[in-house]
Amino acid sequence: MEPRAAQVQRRERLGRQQEDRPSREGEPRSGGAECPGNAEVHRGPDLVQWTQHMQALKTQLLEQAQGQLMELLDQAMWEAVQAYPLQDRPVPSVPPDSLRKTREPSLGKRKVFIIRKSLLDELMEVPHFRTIYHMFVAGLCVFIISTLAIDLIDEGRLMMEFDLLTFSFGQLPLALVTWVPMFLSTLLVPYQALRLWERPQSGGAWTLRVGLGCLLLAAHTVVLGILPVHVAVEYQLPPASRCVLVFEQVRLLMKSYSFLRETVPGTWARGGEGIRAPSFSSYLYFLFCPTLIYRETYPRTPNVRWNYVAKNFAQALGCVLYACFILGRLCVPVFANMSQEPFSTRALVLSIMHATLPGIFMLLLIFFAFLHCWLNAFAEMLRFGDRMFYRDWWNSTSFSNYYRTWNVVVHDWLYSYVYQDGLWLLGGRARGAAMLGVFLVSAVVHEYIFGFVLGFFYPVMLLLFLVFGGPLNFTMHDRRTGPAWNVLMWTLLFLGQGIQVSLYCQEWYARRHCPLPQTTFWGLVTPRSWSCHT
């Protein structure tokens, strides 16, 4: 079919031809039945307005596309300049305007949002890959059948018990009630602080506004930092309810920082004159959309596919049930009574090897449930266009690539506000120190999350990140290619997950079998599984 714009242009051209054509002798010029040419003439103004509107829309789209293309080309040019050998690199006295514009904010690339699907959604269109998904679903069915068969043999009746699930999500309403003031503080305080800092004034008035904004942010940090910890400890929340609080605590803190980091420098530029603060609606949208990098606008999809939303939420729920079956069938029987046996190196090694399979299953379930299903469900409801929440981390041949592709949402935040800002503070030097800072922040936050969820301090994750993850990041770098390196990466992932599951499960049951007679600081930070052998 002919495009609509071409139809409009053709009709306008016919109308002009009818106007310019000399009337034949005896042909009526007015009155009576109106000829087709006159109808086109009468419709001419509407066609002109419609054509002008389409031209303006085309110009706007071209400008947006040109801006994004220029940004991508500037980024590629800057990376190419940095990759050029230092001794052969010419040093210009004044960098080009485009490079200077790209380098000034963060000495590197800036996150660009575009409309794209998640990688698994694209792979699910391939029948061979979809079969792998069906195999995992079949595994869940086998777990359910085995549970029913064991209940039938032991109890003489079919009975599905979800004791582990109900225990893990106990007191969930209390966790949701605690979330309300955390969210309201994040919704109101950072935006109000920005408005206080929006237009600097001379004298003490502006100093007072800055001080008031800092006090509001300090109170906001205290609310997010102390309230969830107090509720979790005071009411002894179970692990899944604690997960809700700690994930929201970390997420809201990261979003608050990103919003202020992206908007405050702009409002203070040129004395704050002529630069408006972002709208409150854009900030509210940012608090719910699945990204940790603030932008005033994001690419949006045209409509919401509610069947896709329901499918992703159902898959996330299925992953939770899957995880409960794995823990209940593969972990609880092994580790529940392990602390009652004498400690031996053989038993420890065997427990780690036994935990590798459930550990890697838990890793895959967490990835699929959260990074794919949960984030895609919210992205679809909010029509958020950029669905690249992860990349093909399973194909990684180096741990440096694995860290970049496993969780793109968190990686973008760490890269933008820890790595690049660290380079800016260090004057563009010491990339190793900036990278070490990223590892340190990530390790501390991961260990805090594990300690919050489990209710005890056992720095397994911290040591794995700093002792093994850091050196592996520098030794297994992007120059390592080939299938053997991918096999090595997966082998280390299996072992790492086995170590985590084994040691954390042992510590969990040891603290229940060997409670402290009195609470002391060293008793809280010393692993109980080292001495509990009843």
Image (spheres, rainbow, N blue to C red):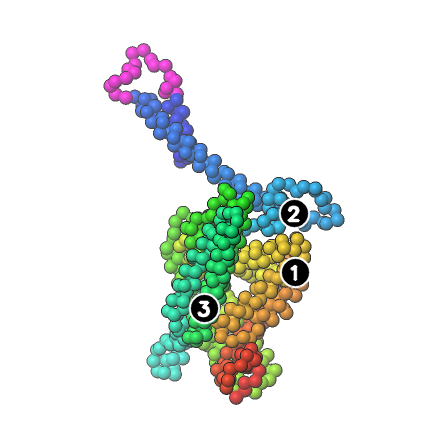
Query: Quick one: SS at disc 2?
Result: helix
According to the picture, the residue beneath numbered tag 3 turns out to be 228
Res 87 seen here: yes
In the image, what residue type sits under mark 1? Ala
Task: Give the residues drawn in magenta, as a range.
Answer: 17-34
- Relative image position of residue 279 (x, y in whole percent): 43, 48
Residue 61 inside the magenta-drawn segment: no
Q: Is residue 481 above or below residue 454?
A: above
Could you tell me how far apart the alpha carbons at marks 3 and 1 are, in whole angstroms? 32 Å
Residue placed most toward the observer, 63 or 525:
525
Pointer 2 or 1: first along the chain: 2
Quadrant where the N terminus lies? top left
Identity, as a three-letter code, of the amino acid under mark 2: Ala
| Amino acid type, callout 3 | Pro
Q: Position of residue 153 (x, y in %)?
A: 38, 82
Q: Which residue is mark 2?
A: 80
Q: Is residue 19 left or right of residue 343?
A: left
- Can residue 383 be seen at all in this image of the molecule? no
Which residue is drawn at the image coordinates 39% and 63% (left, top)?
A: 180
Q: Residue 29 colored magenta?
A: yes
